[in-house]
């Protein structure tokens, strides 16, 4: 059975996003967003390849990164079948310039 591991970068991003959401939209909105992030990522355990391949990263990276959309964020991840682990790499705001995603992922 697959397990989920959040990278340090992804952990930092989710904290930043939730703090911003709390400041701008309140506790309820931040809690709702946190639950959505959690629910979406937990769905990967049963279907790790459900997210489409992130085409921006497809040409650059050795690892096939995929994403889940939690508007306006993409949860970027990859699956290591040997380790039976889904690595959450980062969360990326879709209004940022796409070229920033390569730098953000850093794989």
Image (cartoon, grey):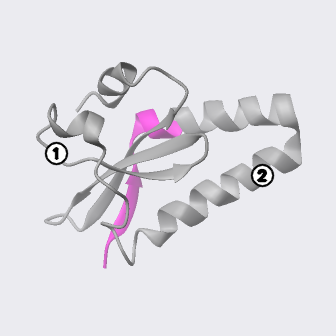
Is residue 5 located in the magenta-colored stretch of the structure?
yes
Instruction: Kindly check if marks 2 and 1 are in contact, taking CB atoms under 8 A apart as contact.
Output: no
Q: At which x and y percent is residue 37? A: 59, 54
Is residue 101 located in the magenta-colored stretch of the structure?
no
**Residue drawn at x 83%, y 29% as measured from the top left:** 23
Q: Which residues are magenta?
A: 1-11
**Quick one: SS at disc 2?**
helix
Q: Nearer the viewer, residue 1 or 92?
A: 92
Q: Nearer the viewer, residue 46 or 58?
A: 58
Which disc, if any, is residue 31?
2
The residue at which mark 1 appears reads as 63
Q: At which x and y percent is residue 67? A: 39, 50
Q: Is residue 25 left or right of residue 36?
A: right
Residues packed near mark 2 inside 10 Å, few (<14), some (14 to 19) or many (20 plus): some
Q: Is residue 80 left or right of residue 10?
A: left
Q: Is residue 70 left or right of residue 67?
A: right
On screen, residue 99 above or below 41: above
Q: Quadrant of the C terminus?
A: top left
Q: At which x and y percent is residue 33? A: 70, 50
On screen, residue 58 above or below 79: above
Q: Quadrant of the N terminus?
A: bottom left
Q: Nearer the viewer, mark 2 or mark 1?
A: 1
**Quick one: SS at disc 1?**
loop
C-alpha distance separating marks 2 and 1: 32 Å
Which disc, if any, is residue 48?
none
């Amino acid at each position: 059975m697959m397990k989920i591991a959040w990278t340090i970068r992804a952990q930092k991003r989710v904290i930043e996003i939730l703090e911003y959401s709390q400041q701008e939209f309140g506790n309820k909105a931040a809690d709702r967003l946190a639950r959505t992030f959690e629910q979406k990522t937990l769905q990967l355990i049963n279907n790790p390849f459900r997210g489409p391949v992130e085409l921006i990263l497809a040409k650059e990276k050795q690892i096939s990164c995929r994403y889940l959309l939690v508007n306006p964020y993409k949860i970027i991840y990859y699956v290591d079948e040997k380790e039976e682990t889904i690595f959450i790499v980062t969360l990326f705001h879709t209004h940022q310039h796409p070229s920033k995603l390569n730098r953000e992922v850093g794989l």
